[in-house]
Image (spheres, helix red, strand yellow):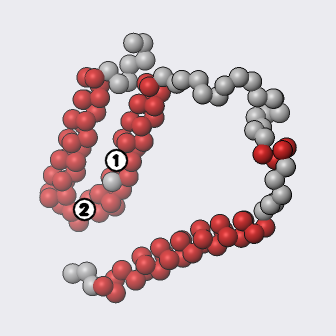
């Protein structure tokens, strides 16, 4: 049974993380340069002056591949609790993971059937 005091370490860790981020944002803003000149505001890419318009269209396939990679990569994160506790979870845990895998395999087969990963078309 989980008690409220069991969550105190998580709250402390979250508070420290958020506090650190806030501290770094404030300190970098105060210590960073504040004088904006034309040279500081200009785009800089490998020392080569800019050419043309940066708004050239990208293929939707590129973005689909990136989004699908992130989607299926994030799902792998959910395997870690099972990998750590698979003995304690027993058959119920195994069935839950099997159901989880079947859900994203159906999604993956849907993506393959729609041709989202085919670059030749």
Q: In the rendered image, which quarter contains the C terminus?
A: top left
Q: Position of residue 108 (x, y in %)?
A: 28, 33
Q: Establish if 1 lies above or below 50.
A: below
Residue visible at 82% across and 47% down in the picture: 40
Is residue 40 placed above or below 4 in the rendered structure?
A: above
Identify which residue, 76 or 47, lies in the foreground. 47
Quarter-wise, where is residue 45 in the image?
top right
The residue positioned 78% from the left and 67% from the top of the image is 31
Q: Residue at x 81, y 29 (%)?
A: 48
Q: Position of residue 76 (x, y in %)?
A: 36, 47
Q: Position of residue 1 (x, y in %)?
A: 21, 81
Residue 7 in the figure: left or right of residue 53? left
Q: Nearer the viewer, residue 104 or 55?
A: 55
Q: Residues within 10 Å of mark 1 (few under 14, many from 20)?
A: some
Residue 24 shown left or right of residue 41 in the figure:
left
Q: Mark 1 — residue?
A: 75
């Amino acid at each position: 049974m989980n008690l409220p005091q069991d969550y105190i370490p998580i709250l402390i860790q979250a508070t420290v993380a958020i506090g650190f981020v806030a501290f770094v944002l404030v300190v970098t803003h105060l210590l960073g340069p504040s004088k904006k000149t034309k040279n500081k505001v200009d785009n800089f890419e490998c020392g080569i002056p800019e050419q043309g318009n940066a708004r050239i269209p990208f293929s939707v396939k590129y973005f689909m591949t990136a989004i699908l990679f992130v989607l299926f990569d994030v799902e792998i994160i959910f395997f870690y609790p099972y990998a750590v506790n698979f003995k304690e979870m027993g058959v119920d845990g195994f069935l839950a993971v099997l159901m989880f895998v079947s859900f994203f395999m159906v999604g993956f087969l849907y993506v393959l059937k729609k041709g989202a990963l085919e670059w030749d078309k």
